[in-house]
Image: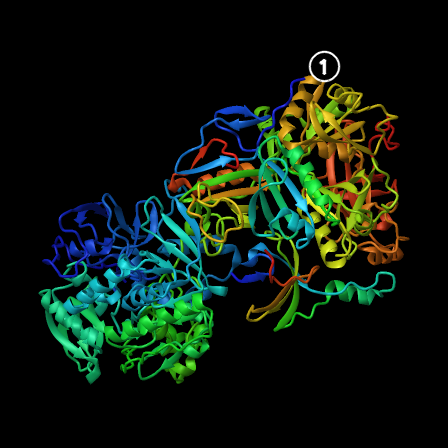
Amino acid sequence: MSSPLARSPIPPGPATERDGWEVDARVPGGPLTLSDETPLAKVHVRAPFDGASRAALGVGFRRTRRADLGAGEVLVVGSGPGEWLVLGAPGTAGALRAAVEQRLAGTGEFTSVLDLTHGRALVRLHGAAAPAVLAGVCAIDLADAVTPDGSAFRTSVAGVVTDVVRDDLGGTQRSGAAASDNGGVRSYLLHCERSSGRYLADALLDAGRLSGLAMTGFRGLA
Amino acid sequence: MSILPTTRRTATPTSQRLGHRAGEVIDRSRTVSFTWNGRPLSGHPGDTIASALAAAGERVLSRSYKYHRPRGLLTADYLDPGAFFQVGDEPNVRGAHRLLEAGMAVSSQNTWPSLRFDLKAANGLAGRFLATGFYYKTFIKPEPLWPLYEKVLRTFVHAGAITPDPGAAYYDKRHAHPDVVVAGGGPAGMAAAVAAARAGASVMLVEEDHQLGGHLRWGDGAALARLRALRAQVAAQPGIEVLTDAVVTGRFDDNWIPIVARSLPGITERLVKARAAVLVVAPGLIERPYVFAGNDLPGVMLSTAARRLVNLYAVRPGSRAVVMSANPEGDAAVADLEAAGVEVAAVLDARRQQGVARAHGRGGLRAVETTDGRRIEADLLVTATGWTAPTSLLNQSGDRPVYDQAAARFVPDPDRMPANVLAAGGIVGDGTVDQLVEQADAVGREAARRATGGSAAGTVPGLRPAPHPELFAAGTGGFVDLCEDVSAKDITTAVAEGYDSVELAKRYTTVTMGPTQGKLETVNAVALVAHATGRSIAETGTTTWRPVYAPVTLGALAGRPREPVRYSPMQPWHERHGATPLVAGQWIRPEHYGDPAAEVTAVRTAVGIIDVTPIGKLDLRGPDVAELLNLLYVNKWSKLGVGRVRYGVMCADDGVVLDDGVTGRLGEDHYLMSTTSSGAATVWEWVENWLQTAHPEWQVHVTPVTTAYASINIAGPRSRDLLSRLTDPEDVDLSADAFGYMNVRTGTVAGVADCVLWRIGFTGELSYEIHVPASYGLHAWERLVAEGADLGVRPFGVEAQRILRLEKGHAIVAQDTDGLTQGFSAALDGLIKLDKDDFVGLPELRWQQGRDSHPRLVGLQPLDGTVVPPEASQILRTDGSIAGRVTSSRMSPTLGRAIGLAQIDPELAEVGTRVTVRLPDGRDVAAEVTGLVHVDPEGERQRV
Amino acid sequence: MMLLPCPWCGPRNATEFRFGGEAGRRPDPASASPEEWRRYLYFHTNPAGWSTETWYHGAGCRRFLTVERHTVTHEVRAARDTATGTTGEGIS
């Protein structure tokens, strides 16, 4: 039996294989794009919101941080009170989960670490006009003063409860909980329950129709 | 009585276009062609439809709502009640606002056989039959005639024709979060916006018209210079987003402000849902019509209308005019008319008790009769008799405007406005442009301070309303509401009939309920009610100005219509294999693949597979999960071993059944709970509710994993054979001894690691449910189909599943129970453990059992097995009273007869009782109460 | 549309929340009389004024909140996490 291929809920354009996943083969690019980032490893952490686990993960609710927790570069997202989502490269979910568990083991706190790679859909909305597109389906103020680069929030996007992470790309400052615009290109990771992924991608494409939003290939965390 | 043509004019209208005007908004270098009731005409870019028609000499533009009287321009702007047109497929276009476009096919609405000769105008002559409250009095009884009444009413309705085809229309929505929204882009609005933006606020400046400027646009040279300067300031100031041809449609809690914007590239309309820190209301003033006999004749218009036509569109509004003026703006209209070459036959100065008594003419103004008895030939009568402050947005903010008798208008009460709403400019009071701008500048700065500073509210300078004579009606009749054809006499009659409050008179006569929503007519209606009741206007008060401020299209409200939908990973396969889709909540599921009965038979005789991904799944971890389960389920959970599965039912604290499902223990502190598909979200919230509000001390983490797994049920006597082909016996031993009924374990299936395998089932057959990490769900499904070909594997859908479970008598929550069904009415007698210390619903269930008078859930079989009583058929006692209902029913392919479940009163619930079932068509059939389980009551088939 | 000041997420549209009604205490199921139990289930004071309510922020932090709201003006004077008591200070 050959090793099965993992598939995203969002149908790809031209498909290729990468790290056990079927991914969109197009080279990512374009002024305003949507890319399917579902293949990224997604490890979900539950722990007290303000204790040693938070210190171990280095970030709290509503903020994000790039870090290496022992399984390559990851994006740690403070996705809820006492809730974190750690995003890593495709195919690293098992190692990432073990690394996070190990890191939290010494805290003595009641924690849970789950691999939700297959339970969530993840897309990236990228480009200078990304806030205008997102404002068509999301009621949250996307201004720098309210949701700067590195901020995370959960809200309704096109009627689906979605975790939104502002993760600008190409800026001067790439890590830490910076509170202001880093000069990069606006970029949002949007993350929802897997079964709603196809709908969410369609709704974003529709909202971006007049802005020229187009699907592009898998980008990854970089 | 004979039907007369409404006009005898037959000459071709001649062009009324003037030479260049300093403030004109038309582009004379280009010409735009359009048709008017099929006749080719032309105008210029910048023209509205109505200004192009007026320039072409057209004076009768529409027929009125009730009496089909000819109407022309009254306000020559957005509000004009005389210029609603059908444009192509689009009805009710505001023709004095909508810009002319090449190729527009414009027609007057609902005129037959033609605009100039309208048969329905006979109603005008028959006006005495259309009495006050006509609709209420005439079309009430007898009720069987309602279909006829509807036809009659529709014939009279003046509402254009819609198309079911939306065509290329694109309606957009977006959210916005400006610090300050300024409603109104006149001099005050512009000044407030600039001041707020200079102080660091982000500003959205919203103007109803196509350009900023308000009344400065049709003013004199000094006004135009001021206009250019203010526009330049707005353009140069960063932080202002200008929306023209846009309307603030309301103000809701916490400054939630919907704005409908048009004239955007590629977008028919956009609804902007703005959440503003501060709203500045700066709509200026609306000129108020004067009520007198003949005031609706084409040729009677407001001074602002005449000045717009002359100065913005270079259109001569008439040839010989009478002007009734009570204010400087009316005097300016005299000057504008004279400059446009209109002969001003008389100026009636209302400040010196001169005025109009009546207007005469048919199909158009012919002569004006003055209060001192003169009769003056004229085709144009211009009135400047006062102003109305459009306070809607302030009313919606909690303000209650007060009547200022000296100024003859309602003015805002600044003491009642919330801190996040301010008013600027003419709505507050009068002044020179300098004074308006000065006040608005202060308001803008204060708005920015409140929006961004957060410190205590400062004071805002006011503006005093200028003295103005009270002029509402001449007392000679005429129309108060030109949209709804409500006359002055209608108001008087309504008061005489007892509708003596303005709110009652409004509803009875429909005054202010047309497309202008009272902006032109409210104050006149109030004045007439006051006069008729002998009260003052202040005592009479005004009607409530509710949202929406201006009519909104359904398209703008709908936006990009989208409803969330959810798909399982196997949906592409279902679509390729002819599944009939079933919408179940947000889920799209296969109802069947063509033959549900054959799908049932496949499960009973061979093996079937069904996609049950929507089944809710909650991952529960922590040392206190067993405590949680004991609290939420009616049965006991403390002794469930690792690897074991138990069925459970949840009730609410009123004892009503909430949900059911199986929960398995995967590890010492790790459980996986399943819920019904429709209950997945409810149960998750339910679990969180009890954990967060009742037992925050318990250590339990709940994670929804419903679609982390693709769930497949494999059911039928050959299900073990099939699953064994996809598993390695070294990893997963499927033998009955190693993996018995109601057990759960993890393992690799079809090469996919970390699957959860359950030996459970609702079909009564040997069956397994596998939860496959969702990204591999389609792979696993395709492998099951391929590997099971020689075993006769068949996919089955929701319909077969319903039949299979009904054959086994498994109740479905919310199908065989409803919002009043307590636990003992759901055949849960053996499951409910009243000896537990506590569980949700315990006291009510204890009392329910004690009363012992509750309906029972039973099996039911019609004696004639070919009759399937539809679900919800009633069960009757011999005296005809209702004793229950059929909750589920199907033809059983396995038994070859109709079977069902029923909720039935206890005295008829005994097995073997004969009952009567009334079908929806009125026939009665006999049926017998049976046990719940119709097929294999001993449950032998699944324990193999 | 009113805003609710979520102690975790900040002010959010009320549509993100589910209203859970007046906050009440569940009587002891072992000793409660039917009258006490049904008072808990069905009887609410429904004041025109200050009311202590439960709201669930389902489209946000997914926390149950105890909110003191004025039912006439919609003013909210206090909102805290029911389980942790968090009022929003120093979260992130």
Chain hosting mark 1: B
Classify residue A171 by image quadrant.
Answer: top left
Which residue is at a point 39% across and 51% down the rendered structure image?
A: B270
Please indicate whether residue B813 sits to the left or right of residue B13 in the image.
right
Q: Residues within 10 Å of mark 1 (few under 14, many from 20)?
A: few
**Relative to B725, does residue B820 appear above or below in the rendering?**
below
**Relative to B789, does residue A190 appear above or below in the rendering?**
below
For the C terminus of chain B, the quadrant is top right
For the N terminus of chain B, the quadrant is bottom left
In this rendered view, identify the residue nearer to me: A198 or B157: A198
In this rendered view, identify the residue nearer to me: B546 or B257: B257
In this rendered view, identify the residue nearer to me: A80 or B845: A80
Please indicate whether residue A79 sits to the left or right of residue B803 in the image.
left
Element at badge 1? helix
**Relative to B72, does residue B488 appear above or below in the rendering?**
below
Residue B878 seen anywhere in this rendered image of the structure: no
Residue labelled with disc 1: B790
- Image spot of residue B826 (x, y percent): 80, 46
Please identify the residue farthest to the right as the structure is shown.
B835
Classify residue B642 by image quadrant.
Answer: top right
- Image spot of residue B601 (x, y percent): 74, 24
- Image spot of residue A15 (x, y percent): 51, 25
Q: Amino acid at mark 1?
A: Asp
- Image spot of residue B145 (x, y percent): 49, 55
